[in-house]
């Protein structure tokens, strides 16, 4: 069992668990090669399409970045195996067809691309495009669609989810009132998270059956899994600095996990049981694995350190007069608020600006200032 994380420090890291009964994930690799934030990670497991390439006998680690590149890595090596160039702006999301090894990517340039295995770069094709930036993608195997070809889902700043199949848009799903930020597929259902502070459950035909309410800020990520009792469990991560666990069939909130920062990503692990282990990626630069198994709980000193981090974060928010998800965690954000400068969504970076034009973009609980470079067109 292993976990891959990506960070604003421009690296990705591989963490491996020493055994199913262990509570220790040890860092085994650091992948250095991007020139900007690592904004998406994925793993392609070994498959027939990769059998002829000895580099990928243990699968492929895939990273996407704000530098617009996708890099393929051999899990046991630190040097890049291949670089994929086609997107014009940040790669925001990655999805994998585990049977064929194909990779799908979404970007702030508004496009979804397919990179077929094994010669990923040479055969890259554009699947489709949105009217706004693409923030998330998810793969739907053909077996869930009654046979034929698989489908790829994409969520966008245009508030829609699109279903792409056979090179064309087969369906556009609407319902969210703001950017669709996260997508996942579990069984015959699709789950989405949004900047409108909700998550939703959809049928593969595009009908919404559940709306999850409870977060107080943007919901960046969603993950779903079927537990040992054949029930669907959903987890969401939000700028309100909580991860929430939900009954995926009723929308009832089962648990709230507070964090000392924005939750950028959540993912269930295939650990079995009625409440599988859960990984959260937090704005405090820490990834955490959560479990209901008391035998695998973190040592007392780790729990104490986490409690202290939570207490310090709450104290800092209280003294600044803000709150989780208020957009006031960073110096730039605070200065922007004092001067009445509006914080923009990241989608504003998709459009060309004037040379020297500066905008302040909300990123988690911080505000980051960007200046348009007319000569570089970025």
Image (spheres, rainbow, N blue to C red):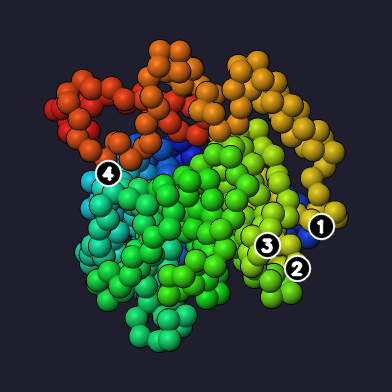
Q: Do the residues labelled 4 and 3 touch (CB within 8 Å)?
A: no
**Residue in the picture at 51% in, 42% down:** 218
Q: Please tell me the numbered disc located at residue 273.
A: 2
How far is the residue under mark 4 from the one under mark 1?
42 Å
Q: Which of the two residues, 28 or 348, is positioned nearer the viewer here? A: 348
Looking at this rendering, what residue extends furthest in the bottom direction? 147
Name the foreground residue: 311 vs 162.
162
Few, some or many residues within 10 Å of mark 4 (<14, 14–19, 20+): many
Residue appearing at x 54%, y 55% in the figure: 199
> Which mark is first along the chain, 1 or 4?
4
Say which label, 2 or 4, has the lower sequence index. 4
Front position in the image: 101 or 125: 125
Q: What element carries label 4?
A: loop
**Distance from Cα at disc 3 to Cα at disc 2:** 15 Å
For the residues bearing labels 4 and 1, Cβ distance under 8 angstroms: no
Question: Is residue 124 visible in the rendered structure shown here?
Answer: no
Dot 1: few (<14), some (14–19), or many (≥20) neighbours within 10 Å?
A: few
Which quadrant holds the C terminus?
top left
Task: Kindly indicate whether the residue at mark 2 contacts the one at mark 1 (C-beta within 8 angstroms).
Answer: yes
Query: Considering the numbered disc 3 on the image, is that residue within a helix, a strand or a loop?
Result: strand
| Earlier sequence position, callout 4 versus callout 3 | 4
User: Residue 231, percent across and down?
Assistant: 68, 71
Q: In this view, does 98 lie above or below 31?
A: below
CA gap, disc 1 and disc 2:
10 Å
**Residue depicted at x 64% and y 67%:** 249
- Circle 4 or circle 3, nearest the eye: 3
Cα distance, mark 1 to mark 3?
Answer: 19 Å
Q: How far is mark 4 from mark 3, CA to CA? A: 36 Å
Give residue 272's position: percent from left, percent from top.
72, 68
Tell me, for residue 293, which label it has, or none. Answer: 1
Label 3 belongs to which residue? 247
Residue that mark 4 sits on: 89
């Amino acid at each position: 069992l292993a976990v891959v994380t990506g960070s604003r420090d421009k690296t990705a890291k591989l963490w491996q668990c020493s055994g199913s009964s262990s509570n220790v994930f040890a860092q085994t690799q650091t992948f250095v090669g991007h020139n900007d934030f690592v904004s998406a990670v994925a793993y392609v497991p070994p498959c027939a399409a990769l059998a002829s390439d000895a580099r990928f006998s243990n699968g492929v680690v895939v990273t996407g970045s704000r530098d617009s590149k996708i890099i393929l890595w051999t899990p046991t090596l630190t040097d890049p195996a291949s670089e994929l160039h086609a997107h014009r702006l940040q790669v925001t999301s990655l999805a994998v067809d585990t049977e064929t090894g194909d990779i799908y990517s979404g970007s702030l340039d508004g496009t979804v691309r397919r990179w077929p295995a094994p010669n990923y770069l040479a055969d890259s094709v554009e699947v489709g495009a949105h009217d706004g930036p693409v923030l998330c993608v998810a793969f739907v195997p053909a077996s869930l669609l009654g046979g034929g070809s698989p489908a790829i889902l994409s969520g966008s700043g245009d508030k829609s989810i699109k279903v792409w199949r056979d090179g064309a848009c087969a369906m556009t799903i609407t319902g969210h009132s703001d950017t669709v930020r996260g997508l996942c597929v579990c069984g015959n259902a699709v789950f989405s998270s949004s900047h409108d502070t909700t998550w939703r459950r959809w049928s593969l035909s595009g009908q919404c059956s559940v709306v999850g309410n409870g977060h107080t800020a943007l919901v960046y990520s969603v993950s779903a899994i079927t537990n040992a009792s054949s029930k669907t469990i959903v987890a969401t991560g939000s700028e309100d600095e909580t991860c929430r666990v939900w009954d995926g069939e009723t929308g009832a909130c089962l648990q709230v996990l507070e964090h000392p920062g924005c939750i950028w990503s959540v993912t269930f692990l295939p650990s079995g049981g009625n409440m599988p282990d859960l990984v959260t990626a937090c704005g405090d630069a820490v990834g955490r694995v959560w479990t209901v198994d008391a035998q695998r709980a973190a040592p007392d000193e780790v729990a104490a350190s986490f409690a202290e981090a939570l207490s310090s974060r709450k104290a800092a928010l209280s003294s600044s007069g803000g709150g989780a998800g208020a957009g006031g965690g960073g110096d730039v954000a605070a200065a922007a608020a004092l001067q009445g400068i509006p914080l923009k969504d990241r989608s504003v970076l998709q459009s060309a600006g004037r040379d020297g034009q500066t905008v302040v973009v909300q990123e988690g609980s911080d505000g980051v200032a960007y200046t348009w470079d007319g000569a570089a067109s970025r």
